[in-house]
Image (spheres, rainbow, N blue to C red):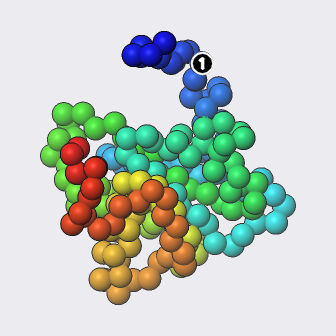
């Protein structure tokens, strides 16, 4: 009815049961992230790995909702080795961390680990929402250092220019 707030049956969603069910393994972790690796589901595999950086709020499973809507599952079914950053829920113990820490301990570290595991100099990158903003900042830092590590960058719903944020500025 009009004016009523609908509720969501939270029991209908269970991580690892009907959400985030693409098989993957944690291959690295630090104070801020875990890096999950998903192996390709095809006999032929792309040489270059794909690193996905989701938003800090929605976590990695926003990219792996259910088999029919999972971007991660789709990528591995196409022959990609996928690595995904899983952000830690920050509590008071992480209150000392700032933007630079998120850049350094997030994508800069993830890129280094992905390159070491894969043996590839160049990787493909995908960022979603503020994860895309953080990833783009990391790639800009690397470019300023004279390092080119991304063969491609795909951004989904990512804000890069903040001088006129529009409605999001109210947050």
Displayed quadrant of residue 69: top right
Horizontal and vertical percent position of residue 33: 39, 47
Q: Viewer-proximal residue, 29 or 106?
A: 106
Looking at the picture, does residue 89 appear above or below residue 100? Answer: above
Location of residue 94 (image quadrant): top left
State left or right for residue 139 relative to residue 77. Answer: left
Confirm whether residue 61 shows in the render: yes
Which residue is rendered at x = 45% and y = 45% of the image? 86
Q: Position of residue 70 (x, y in %)?
A: 65, 45
What residue is at 70 percent from the left and 52 percent from the top?
74
Residue wearing tag 1? 12
- For mark 1, give the secondary structure: helix
Query: Outermost residue toward the bottom?
Result: 146
Mark 1 nearby-residue class (10 Å; few <14, some 14–19, many ≥20)? few
Please give the name of the residue rendered at 71% of the width and 39% of the height, measured from the top-left corner.
67
* Residue 42 left/right relative to 24: right
Is residue 26 visible to us here? no
- Horizontal and vertical percent for residue 116? 52, 68
Q: Is residue 98 above or below residue 51?
A: above
Q: Return the x and y of residue 170 as percentages of the image width and height.
A: 21, 45
Q: How many marks?
A: 1
Q: Residue at x 81, y 58 (%)?
A: 42
List the single residue furthest toward the left. Answer: 96
């Amino acid at each position: 009815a009009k004016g009523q707030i609908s509720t969501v049956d939270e029991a209908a969603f269970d991580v690892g049961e009907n959400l985030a069910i693409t098989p993957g393994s944690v291959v690295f972790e630090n104070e801020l992230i875990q890096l999950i690796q998903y192996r390709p589901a095809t006999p032929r595999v792309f040489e270059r790995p794909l690193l996905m950086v989701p938003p800090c709020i929605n976590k990695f499973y926003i990219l792996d909702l259910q088999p029919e809507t999972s971007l991660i599952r789709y990528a591995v079914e196409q022959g990609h080795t996928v690595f995904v950053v899983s952000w830690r829920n920050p509590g008071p113990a992480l209150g000392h961390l700032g933007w630079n820490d998120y850049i350094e301990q997030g994508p800069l570290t993830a890129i280094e680990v992905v390159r070491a595991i894969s043996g590839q100099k160049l990787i493909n990158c995908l960022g979603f929402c503020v994860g895309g903003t953080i990833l783009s900042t990391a790639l800009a830092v690397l470019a300023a250092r004279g390092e080119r590590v991304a063969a491609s960058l795909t951004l989904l719903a990512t804000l890069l220019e903040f001088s006129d944020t529009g409605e999001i500025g109210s947050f």
